[in-house]
Image: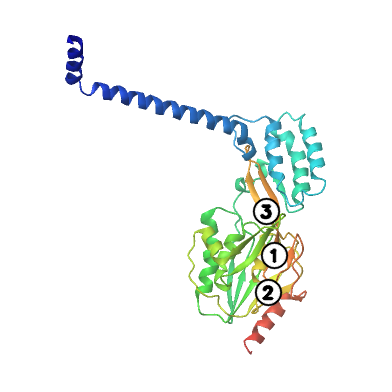
Amino acid sequence: MENRSLFCYNQLRNPHKKGCAIMKKVLLGCLGTVLVLLALLIGFLAYCGPDYGIFLFPPSPQDYARSVVKKLDFGLYTDKDWENEKKKALEKLESAKTYQDTYPVLEKLTKEAGGKHSYFLSPQDNPENSPESKNQPEVQNREGILYLKVPAFTGDAQAAKTYANKLSAALKKDTYQSVLVDLRDNTGGNMYPMLAGLSSLLPDEDLFQFVEKNGSKSAVSRSDILKQLGLEQTDDKAKKVPIAVLTNERTGSSGEMTALAFKGLENVKIFGQPTASYTTGNNYYQLYDGAVLLLTTSSILDRTGRLYENESIQPDVLTEQPLEEAESWLREQLGE
């Protein structure tokens, strides 16, 4: 009885002592749980991370190459003899001593998986490590015809906005009655500033669709383009003016995608020569050592229902004098 009284006395004297002990156990339990989850996460990343280009430690040349090959599995042309080609490539890669040793094999395998529009680029050839394109759109008002020279583009987000804003600023003015979009010699790069800058000429509907090899489709609309660059949509409706688009054999990749955005519109006519035939969609992968994989994973469906798979875009008017004929057609549309 005396001992029990002493115990009760001590509890009353230190009422928070028991609570502190419980809290300590809870904290230790939580810490243990966190450590277990952290260990599981590290284990998962160590085992599965290389499949997604995530390495906790510098990968061996073989692990590096295998992580690239797993991405190549999604290439548009991996249905035929791909497994055999992949096996032969992996066997060659077993002797690689450095990442650089893997490049020739990976370059060849990239073309097998993705075709001519796909590229494995070393860190030295990575576009992000190259000087930004100095190309900027050229704007002229030719007696009511707004002439827009739309060149190839590479650069960061700010440069992309500058490029797009130069085109959109010209289109906001009311000093023209028709537009001439010159895509000749536009070899590609980033299509988003091109399309964003021209967006007030385009309807807010599906401009084109990417079609994966399993048949799934993903559409690209005018609003999608503007969101990609963080730009606001200022025009509810496309400007209904006559539009002429110029192409040649050096209009390629993103230049071709820009042409396709206009293809099939009733107020548009394309003049010039067939394009360079890089009409497929690419995925961009930044690799562990700074190299880049540009892999073709989809064909392109235009608004008319025509499917392109590295095929040229045919002009509506095949001509060696596209500028002169386009200007003549535009003036005819205006009744001049």
Q: Amino acid at mark 2?
A: Gly
Residue shown at 59%/68% (left/top)?
138
The image quarter containing residue 91 is: top right
Q: What residue would you read off at disc 1?
A: 301
**Disc with the residue nearer the chain's start (2 vs 3):** 2
Amino acid type, label 3: Asn
* Mark drawn on residue 225: none
Residue 172: image x %, image y %? 50, 74
Pointer 1 or 3: first along the chain: 3
Q: Residue at x 30, y 22 (%)?
A: 21
Q: Residues within 10 Å of mark 2 (few under 14, many from 20)?
A: some
Q: Could you say whether the residue bearing mark 2 is in a helix, strand or loop?
A: loop
Pick the front one: 192 or 237: 237
The correct choice, above or below, for 153 with respect to 170 in the image is above
Q: Nearer the viewer, mark 2 or mark 1?
A: 1
Kindly identify which residue carries mark 3.
282
How many numbered circles does the render carry? 3
Residue at point 49%, 27% (across, down)? 36
User: What quarter of the picture does the C terminus occupy?
Assistant: bottom right
- Snapshot quadrant of residue 152: bottom right
